Image (spheres, helix red, strand yellow):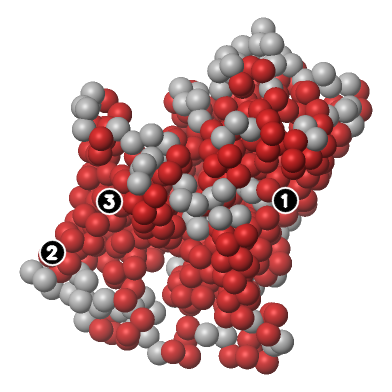
Amino acid sequence: MSAESALRLDATFIDYAIVAIYFLFVLGIGWAARSRISDSIDFFLSGRSLPAWVTGLAFISANLGAVEIVGHSANGVSYGFETMHYFWIGAVPAMVFLGIVMMPFYYGSKVRSVPEFMLRRFGPGAHLVNALSFAIAQLLIAGVNLLLLAKVVNALLGWPLWITLVVAAAIVLSYITLGGLSAAIYNEVLQFFVIIAALLPLTLISLHNVGGWAGLKEKVADPQHFHTWPGTEISGFEHPIVSVIGLVFGLGFVLSFGYWTTNFVEVQRSMAADSLSSARKTPIIGAFPKMLIPFIVVIPGMVAGATVTPIMDGSAQPNDAILYLMRDMLPNGLLGVAIAGLLAAFMAGMAANISAFNTVFSYDLWQSYVVKDRPDNYYLKVGQVATAVAAIVAILTALIAQNYGNVMDYLQALFGFFNAPLFATFILGMFWKRMTPTAGWAGLVTGTSAAVAYWAVATFGGTDIAFFNLPGQGTAFVAASIAFVVDIVVSVAVSLVTTPKPDHELVGFVKSVTPKDTLTDAHEATLPWYRRTVPLGALCLALALLLNIVFA
């Protein structure tokens, strides 16, 4: 988007003032958190000292970046309510599973990152593959958030893209470098409320301007856009039954569980909690707002698709839908809140990517394979330098993301490459003690390679075979499913011909050899039901099922 773009937000002094006040709060939180940094655990994991409600809101806010705001509003333009699958099928069940089943292993083992869990379960081969792939993925995804943050500044001020990329990166860099993960998490809590304050009025005003729910139904040409199932448009499968299977397995199981249960960007927030009970409740607390957020993200996309001329005639990309709607619907003052909300969302996403990257780079790559056995303060400085380098690299990866009209296509491909095979390795290794270290890295490499090969043929192969020419985001679902299945098959085959670790080395990492009392918090049994992990998780799943039934 150039400085001469027709998309320019008509901001006034009051809007600029609101944005400026927000940035002062962001930098102030970073400065305040600086006093709490005494060692690397404080910088990378907040000293494992934060309460569940803070980590729970940070958990969901870290995900409330480009994927939610721009990616899913763009999906709202193209697919309407079928986009809800990314929340009710593609998030909530996996978040509950993470809290109830997997967090006891992560938190109880006292590992500092997800790749470190891989190191202690499978050894250096799987650890190195996971650490490298995760680091690369975070730099690519941080570029998405940075690009969209720069677009908002461009629309507000008319600055050239490269200037806005540099300025946006510098702001995020400043508060993470000052306060580490604590600064990122407390800013994410602030950003959660700012984002809601931005999107809720935009949804209500835009719905009012099209005549409410009935008016929106009249303006949206495709009646299927008001139903979630069978989801044939977003899955890419024409047959309803095949579409349901593809969504439940490809999105609801492989992509969803792969992302939410193994992605250190999210798991890091739970690891920062002050107890095992708080760590387990963190993703479940985040799952409650996760169920409601699509209403204030998808509906604005649907309104924009039905009322904004550049979106309707195809002269503008679906990624820009939310900006056009802000331009056309919001009065000054509310426009400033909305701009601050978008900036908050993109900064939350980018900060989460970079804070996870600097932890994995410092602990899992630099300390493990480059410079070992140095004082703790040395690795703290390495993490701060890695933060700066990541912000610079994100500027370059933002230019890659610029080539995609709908960033969800790009992001789902990345998740299929990296998270789907990782989940296969994790789930097999956590519940099958016979799985060997060799199988750990072999499954990851072959699973990722299979997904990349399928995607490359589908994208660049020019073949007429329907399997490689799926509309919607079906290609991402299939790539993830291929990665998962290939990883499982290879891992089982390799495990049967290689030597597993002895049982005593698997305690805390494999369920069958880990004492049950180490996987639970005895204090939690004394709490009322609404503060216990399992009842909260069951309530969450019941509400998600109800939403699927109501909007089927």
For label 2, the residue is 494
Identify residue type, mark 2.
Val
Say what secondary structure mark 3 lies in. helix
C-alpha gap between disc 3 and disc 2 = 16 Å
Q: Is residue 210 left or right of residue 269?
A: right
For label 3, the residue is 483
Identify residue type, mark 1.
Phe
Q: Residue at left 33%, top 73%?
A: 430
Q: Position of residue 525 (x, y in %)?
A: 63, 91
Which one is in front, 215 or 46? 215
Residue 376 visible in rendering: no
For label 1, the residue is 192
Residue 2, compared with residue 11, is above or below; it is: above
10 Å crowding of disc 3: few (<14), some (14-19), many (20+): many
Residue 294 visible in rendering: yes
Q: Quadrant of residue 524?
A: bottom right
Outermost residue to the left: 497
Say what secondary structure mark 2 lies in. helix
Q: Quadrant of residue 152?
A: top right
Q: Position of residue 367 (x, y in %)?
A: 39, 54
Residue 124, compared with residue 326, is above or below; it is: below
First in residue order: circle 1 vs circle 2: 1
Outermost residue to the top: 4
